[in-house]
Each structure stands twice: as C-alpha cells, then as structure tokens.
Image: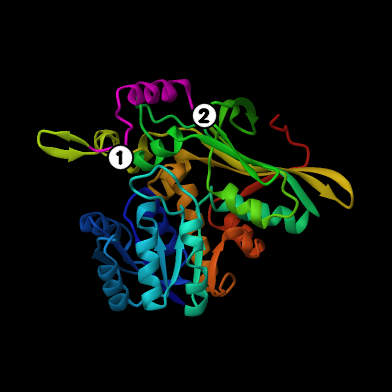
C-alpha cells in the first residue's frame, strides 16, 4: 500500500522498523536513514527477508537539501521522524518541498534553549494545507496515545472534560546506578526544566520537581510522581472541550533524583558550551556520551510501565471519572523487538499513526495533533499491535 522513510536508528526507530515489518499490508517498503549508516544496516540485516522490503541510507537530517534528495530518490508516501526534536523543522521543510506526509513523536525544541512548545510547528499549518499534505505531531505515547485517549474519552464518555491528569510510571529496573530510558540529552533537559500545568486557561509555573504526590498504580503499586511540563498539555487545552486544568506527572526513583542533583550541582547538565583543551563542548552532550545508550537497556530492564490519563468531567449533567491506561512489560517488549518498554511505547504508536495516514483514516491537509483525529481506529490498532489498554470508572484521583 505504501512506502515510509524512517529517519533515526535508535531505540524508538528500531521499534518502528519492527512494527512496520509486522504490518506489511500497509508498509510495503521502508527506508531507514540515519547519520550512522551501520545502525541502519544492522536493522535491515535483522529484519529483511519478510514481506516488507527494506533499504538504508546515510542522512544528516539537519541538512534540508540532503533530506530532499533522499525523499526524491526513495519516493516515500510518508516520513516518520524518530530522530531528534531539534531536527523537526528541517524535516518538515523537506516534506513540504517534496509533497510528502510527515509524522513525529516529539515537538520541536531549539538546541540552545531547553524549551519545547508547538508554536514553531503550528506555524506550518497553512503551508501543509496548501501543499495538500498531512503532518501529525507528537505521535508517541506521551505525547501521542495520551491525546488519543483524551479524544476517545471525549467522544464516548463525556460532554465536557474538566480535569486531566496524565500519569507516566516506569517501574522497570535496568541495574545501572544511573541511566536514562530515552535520549539522555532530551530526557535530562525535560526533567531539569521548570514544571508547569494549565489551569483556567493559563500556564502555572513551578520549580523543577517542586510538586510531588504518591499514586497507587494498577499492577505496579505506589510510586512517587512529580509534576513536569509536557508538550501535550498545550494542544489538549485547545482541543478538548471544557478543560479547567491539565497536569502531567512522571515517576522518578530517589536514586535517579540523587544522581541528577549531583550532576546538576557540578554543571554536567548544562547546555551552555564551555572550552575544554581548546575545544567548545556542551557538558550535557558530553554526559550523554558517557551514559549507557538507552538502546542497550533492553536485555537488562525488568518490570513494567503504566501510562495513562485520568479524566474528570460531566455526562448528561452528572459527574464522571474515567481512567484509561496501558501496562507494558519490559521483558515482553525485549523478547518481541529487542527493546525496553520506553522505546516500545513510543515506537508502536508512531507506526500506527503512520498507518492511519497511509490508509486514509487520518489523512487531511494541514498540521494536526493526534487528538484532532478520530480515535477509534487508533485505539483498535493499539490492542492489535501490542499496547492493549484498560479502563476504570472508579479510579483513585490525584489530589
């Protein structure tokens, strides 16, 4: 049915490739492109021989002309961007120039500022609409599935949703003293930034990890959760009817936070360049180089994740609470695709979102967040492709 250019060759990209090959009726041919060609070739060698044809290419995704040339050579129907958020705009420019659909898992973030918001990509709305092509933003799990969950809750259960709490819990253990579950540079920038939430149409800012609660998660038990800023708050506040407050919470162990605090105190999480032996280096990028590669955590990680949304609102004038979530097991993810659950929960939705575009279910010209599409076919695909969801109408609430 279609051809996909997958940009990136890390842990999430590996899951996307595996899942595209599990869905050959939609993904007849894929091209894996990255700055490191050997990683692309390794994925091809692991998976070729099935119905999905696989090519590889070396690509500097910061170079728009280079990306345009690859698109013109491979002629994909969609570009799945699972590279770095810094590269979103360059890849979108290449898609515009070639008339190809676009999908990513995280919104644009400038290299020199630890700030992520949708304004840069939303500015492309009219351009994509005029070009007659679709851009799907933030189609991982959070953002991504959390937006689909919100649209599903709105469509089937609520007249208005007043409160949303997004809860992301990782109860896995990889055995390292300190490691991040996805790109260390992006992860640490996210965690060390100021927290924020939306209340009554306004952003409320907090100090990093200032607000803490304890939540009893289904299947993994009580965990400390901390309020973070997260990108889907911005789009959900616009797209879900009746919103009064949206918050995002993530679990961190005391061990993780202690290591992070020490690294901050000695300047290792800084994104300001310093001079070392006559060269300019960014401390956080150096730290990334010495930390374990998240793609290597799969065989070591044991335990489960639980990611979902708690909604409070009204239906037919009556109050209603609703919790929808997915529980994923690290060991099962590794057995299936060779990756831990953090990469799995991001890569599976990216494949599903691309399939939604290629099959016409989510195909309309412009730039969209996932909650602006029909959630039902996506929710069905989550059950089919490894991320089954559960629901409760009597959940424990976050105070």
Using a 10 Å C-alpha cutoff, classify the residue at mark 2 as few (fewer than 14 neighbours), some (14 to 19) or many (20 or more): few
Question: Residues under labels 1 and 2: Cα distance?
Answer: 29 Å
Residue 207's tag is: 2
Q: Residue at x 59, y 71 (%)?
A: 361
Q: Residue 335, image x and y in percent?
A: 42, 45
Q: Report whether 113 appears left or right of 220.
A: left
Q: Depth check: 57 or 106 in front?
A: 106
Residue at the far front in the pictured view: 202
Judge whether residue 29 can be spotted in this image.
no
Q: Secondary structure beneath disc 2? A: loop
Does the stretch in magenta take in 261?
Answer: yes
Residue 312 position by quadrant: top right
> 127 or 47, which lies in front?
127
Q: Which x, y percent locates residue 311? A: 72, 44
- Extent of the magenta region: 251-273
Mark 1: which secondary structure? loop
Farthest residue, direction right: 317
Q: Residue at x 35, y 21 (%)?
A: 262
In the rendered image, residue 316, in percent from the top left (x then y), is placed at: 89, 53
**Disc marking residue 293:** 1
Residue 41 vs residue 336, the one in the foreground? 41
Earlier-in-chain disc, 1 versus 2: 2
Q: Is residue 172 above or below residue 266?
A: below
Mark 1 against mark 2, which lies toward the viewer? 2
User: Marks 1 and 2: CB-CB under 8 Å?
Assistant: no
Q: Is residue 97 magenta?
A: no
**Residue 296 seen in this snapshot:** yes
The numbered dot on residue 111 is none
Residue under the point 43% across and 29% down:
173
Frontmost residue, 52 versus 164: 164
What is the total number of numbered labels drawn onto the structure image?
2
Pick the quarter of the image with the C terminus: top right
């Amino acid at each position: 049915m279609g051809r996909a250019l997958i940009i990136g060759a890390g842990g999430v990209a590996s899951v996307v490739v595996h899942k595209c090959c599990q869905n050959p009726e939609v993904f007849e041919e894929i091209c894996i492109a990255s700055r490191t060609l050997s990683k692309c070739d390794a994925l091809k060698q692991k998976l070729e021989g099935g119905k999905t044809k696989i090519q590889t290419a070396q690509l500097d995704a910061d170079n728009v002309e280079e990306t345009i040339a690859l698109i013109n050579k491979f002629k994909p129907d969609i570009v799945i961007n699972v590279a770095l958020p810094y590269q979103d705009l360059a890849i979108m420019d290449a898609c515009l120039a070639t008339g190809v659909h676009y999908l990513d898992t995280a919104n644009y973030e400038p290299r020199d500022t630890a700030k992520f918001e949708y304004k840069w990509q939303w500015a492309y709305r009219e351009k994509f609409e005029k070009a007659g092509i679709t851009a799907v933003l933030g189609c991982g799990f959070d953002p991504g599935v959390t937006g689909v969950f919100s649209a599903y809750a709105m469509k089937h259960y609520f007249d208005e949703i007043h409160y949303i709490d997004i809860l992301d819990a990782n109860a896995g253990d990889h055995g390292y003293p300190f490691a991040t579950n996805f790109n260390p540079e992006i992860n640490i920038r996210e965690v060390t930034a100021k927290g924020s939430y939306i209340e009554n149409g306004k952003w409320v800012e907090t100090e990093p990890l200032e607000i803490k609660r304890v939540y009893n998660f289904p299947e993994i038990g009580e965990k400390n959760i901390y309020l973070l800023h997260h990108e889907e708050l911005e789009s959900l506040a616009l797209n879900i009817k009746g919103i009064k407050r949206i918050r995002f919470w993530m679990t961190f162990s005391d061990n993780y936070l202690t290591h992070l605090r020490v690294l901050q105190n000695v300047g290792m999480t800084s994104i300001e360049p310093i001079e070392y032996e006559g060269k300019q280096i960014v401390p956080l990028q150096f730290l990334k180089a010495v930390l374990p590669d998240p793609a290597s955590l799969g065989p070591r990680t044991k335990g489960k994740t639980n990611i979902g949304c708690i909604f409070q609102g009204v239906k037919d004038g009556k109050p209603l609470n609703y919790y929808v979530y997915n529980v994923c097991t690290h060991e099962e993810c590794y057995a299936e695709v060779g990756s831990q659950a953090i990469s799995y929960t991001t890569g599976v939705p990216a494949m599903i979102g691309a399939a939604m575009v290629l099959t016409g279910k989510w195909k309309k010209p412009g730039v969209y967040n996932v909650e602006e599409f029909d959630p039902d076919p996506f929710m069905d695909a989550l059950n089919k492709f490894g991320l089954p969801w559960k629901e409760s109408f009597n959940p424990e609430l976050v105070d």
